[in-house]
Image (cartoon, rainbow, N blue to C red):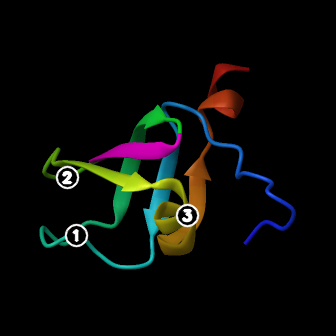
Amino acid sequence: MFEGGEQMLLHVGDLVKMRKSHPCGNDIWKITYVGADIKMRCEKCERIVMLERPVFEKRLKKIIQSAEEAET
């Protein structure tokens, strides 16, 4: 997705939509940790999942709401 080793700019608190739905039927997640891995919580059933950053970036459909924008 990003060339030359660039990383997607993510923040704790971002709401993201993933390409596939969770087994509970929801596809909206809230980011709870950002680093080499991305930890996120399902907004419907509150299940926590941790993905490696490249896997997360491949499965991400879009960022619905950025926590950075919500603060301002």
Please state which amino acid type lies under the numbered disc 1: His
Q: Quadrant of the N terminus?
A: bottom right
Amino acid at pointer 2? Lys
Query: Does 46 appear above or below 27?
Result: above
Which label lies toward us, 1 or 2? 1
- Rendered image quadrant of residue 64: bottom right
Mark number displayed over residue 54: 3
Q: Between residues 64 and 52, which one lies in front from this camera angle?
A: 52
Q: What amino acid is labelled 3 in the image?
A: Pro
* Residue 44 image label: 2
Taking the spot 37% from the left edge, 58% from the top edge, the residue there is 28
What secondary structure is marked by label 3? helix
Query: In the image, residue 36 lies at what x, y percent?
Result: 52, 43
Residue that extends furthest to the top in the rendered view of this protein: 71
Where residue 32 appears, as percent x and y from the top left, is: 39, 33
* Tags 3 and 1 touching, CB below 8 Å: no
16, 72: nearer the viewer: 16
Packing grade of label 2 (10 A; few <14, some 14-19, many >=20) is few
How far apart marks 2 and 3 lie (CA) works out to 24 Å
The C terminus - image quarter: top right
Q: Is residue 45 left or right of residue 65?
A: left
Q: Earlier in the sequence, mark 3 or mark 1?
A: 1
